[in-house]
Image (tube, rainbow, N blue to C red):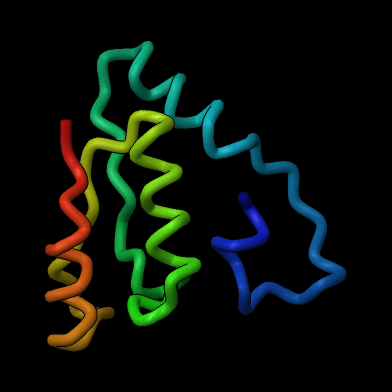
């Protein structure tokens, strides 16, 4: 899933990010609220694949999405608001 979140990252970039499901689980275990910040930087709000990514994250325990951001145009804000993330 990490490859979906960094489409502008050079292919030869090597990182050691943990899997998204592990991060969400840890945030929940520690009593935090997992939120996807400024998704418009990484996800195309018009792409079905992006909707599937958010749906998958919700199934993992994602509880919020930053829909309103200076990184998003009005159309993206509307789409992200309609994604209905939350418990």
- Residue at horizontal 19%, vertical 79%? 70
- Residue at horizontal 62%, vertical 78%? 8
- Residue at horizontal 43%, vertical 77%? 47
Q: Position of residue 40 (x, y in %)?
A: 35, 73
| Residue 22 in the figure: left or right of residue 86 | right
Q: Looking at the rendering, which quadrant does residue 24 occupy?
A: top left
User: Compared with residue 40, is residue 73 higher up or lower down, i.e. above or below?
Assistant: below
User: Compared with residue 4, is residue 43 higher up or lower down, i.e. above or below?
Assistant: below
In this view, which residue lies farthest toward the right?
A: 12
Q: Position of residue 81 (x, y in %)?
A: 13, 63
User: Compared with residue 4, is residue 85 higher up or lower down, i.e. above or below?
Assistant: above
User: Compared with residue 6, is residue 87 higher up or lower down, i.e. above or below?
Assistant: above
Q: Position of residue 6 (x, y in %)?
A: 60, 66
| Residue 37 in the figure: left or right of residue 47 | left
Q: Position of residue 33 (x, y in %)?
A: 24, 30
Placement of the C terminus among the 4 image quadrants: top left
Residue closest to the eye, 9 or 45: 45
């Amino acid at each position: 899933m990490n490859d979906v979140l960094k489409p502008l990252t050079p292919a030869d970039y090597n990182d050691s990010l943990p899997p998204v499901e592990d991060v969400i689980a840890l945030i929940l275990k520690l009593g935090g609220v997992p939120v996807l910040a400024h998704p418009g930087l990484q996800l195309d709000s018009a792409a079905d694949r992006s909707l599937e990514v958010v749906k998958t994250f919700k199934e993992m325990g994602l509880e919020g999405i930053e829909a309103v951001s200076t990184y998003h145009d009005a159309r993206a804000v509307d789409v992200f608001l309609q994604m209905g993330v939350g418990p």
